[in-house]
Image: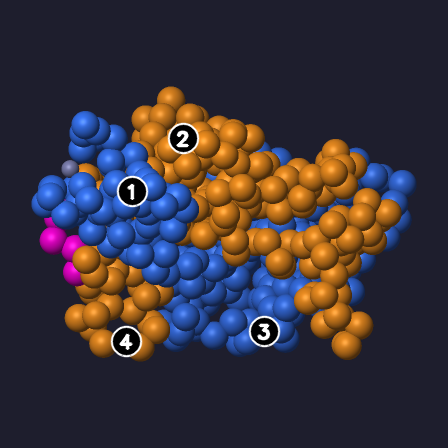
Chain colours: A orange, B blue
Amino acid sequence: MSEHSKLQSEITDEELIRRFQEDDFSAYTVIVNRYKDQLLNFAYRFLGSFEEAEDIVQETFLRLYRNKHAYRQIAKFSTWIYTIAGNLAKTELRKRKRRKVMSISDMGYEDRELEIRDEGANTEQVANSALTEKIIQRAIDELPSRFKEVIILRDIQELSYEEVGSILKIPLGTVKSRVNRARLKLQSKLRDIKMPSL
Amino acid sequence: MKNCDYYRTLFSDYIDAELDAPALSALKAHLDGCAACAQSLRDMQAVKSSLASLPPVKTSESFDLLLQARLRRETRQTAKSRRFFPFFELNWRTPAYAAAALCLIFFGSLLQRFASSSYSATSSDTATLLNALRNDIAVEPGYMVFVELDTVNNRYRIINYAAIDNMDSRKEFQRTGDDMRALPNLRDAPQNEPVLIRTSSQSRPRVRQAEFIF
Ligand SMILES: [Zn+2]
């Protein structure tokens, strides 16, 4: 058990992937548990759909499983896995545009609202924060992918500009100017709406 | 003289405290005389903090289960020589999770090869599920079906289903309110039709998955 806790908290990602590359499957499960929620948050905000986001994260871990030897120790593992998830999410978005089947029911809001309601906060607060979230998510959905990805990684996941740059493989200066433009676009989308938390 | 558009390119760096001293004082001087930019900067700060405070989502109960199912299939296809796949020895989660794992229903060779500790379904259970689905589409063998069992209301609901080797085929299934007693024991199911039971979901926390140890 103490061995297990040690595995969970102290071992670096890079060590875990190295072990997994040597066929230690328990290292894989630690990686999955360490990254599934982070990647889900990224994909959920990017796609606006909980179900699709879970599929993307599943696929990311399947690719990790299949292609474990594609990872090289020169890169940070977190960057590598985010890049896989990000590419899958972008592909999904393109597929969806081709299908042109975006309906409200695809957005996954109903589940989220119910979940929020169960957290025991007072009703008005909850209604307000659920509304705010819905409005913000709608605004994010309307951003072009290149703005969406930077603002999610930087402002929702709170990664450094350097990390965002490595994940998206774009120079630091480009990340910064893109984040600035994404924030300006988002605020102009949100400006005319009375935001409970603004 | 720089214009407002120029100063707005500095907002992010200002908020993130990454402006150098000369740029900072130039921006501050502009903000003192430009109410529009000052307001825009306040808006950007508000947007940034709203984004940071969005509630995080968590993977659903069925996430690990589904990943296991897919990996099992993967190993079956790509590593047939591997005789033993140690999934059920791993402590992925809590005892509640273990209970959920027991509800994983696998049939046929998948069951025999990999899921020795999972439970199987009766043919009538499976027939009930498949009949429900046939009202929607023709289900071929090899589909995965997620069913939510609601012990409080004694109902089951088919949430979605997909061809096990093609998750792009995943479809939502809208019908609700089926009587759970139509799925009596979930044992001795027909071959080659993997069915995955989703015992609870984030949106239905009152469903008590612990009751589903068959
Ligand atoms: Zn100005």
Query: In the image, which is nearer the foreground, mark 2 or mark 4?
Result: 2
Q: Does dot 3 land on a helix, a strand or a loop?
A: helix
Mark 4 lies on residue:
A121
**Spot occupied by residue A193 in the image (x, y as percentages of width and height):** 13, 48
Q: Front-most of A24 and B77?
A: A24
**Whether residue A60 is situated above or below residue A27 in the rendered picture:** above
Q: Position of residue B161 (x, y in %)?
A: 49, 44
Chain for disc number 4: A
The three-letter code of the residue at mark 2 reads Arg
- Asked if labels 2 and 3 touch by Cβ distance under 8 angstroms, the answer is no
Q: Quadrant of residue A36?
A: bottom right
Residue at the (47%, 59%) spot, across then down: B58
Which quadrant of the rendered structure holds the C terminus of chain A? bottom left
Q: Position of residue A29 (x, y in %)?
A: 70, 57
Magenta range is A191-196
Residues under numbered marks 3 and 4 in contact, where contact means CB atoms less than 8 Å apart: no
Is disc 1 in the same subunit as disc 2? Answer: no
Question: Which tag is nearer the camera, tag 3 or tag 1?
Answer: 1
Closer to the camera in the image, A142 or B174: A142
| Callout 2: SS | helix
Q: Hey, what amino acid is under mark 3?
A: Ala
Which residue, given by chain and number where applicable, does mark 1 sit on?
A: B11
Q: Secondary structure at mark 1?
A: helix
**Residue shown at 18% from the left, 33% from the top:** B4
Q: Closer to the observer: label 1 or label 2? A: 1
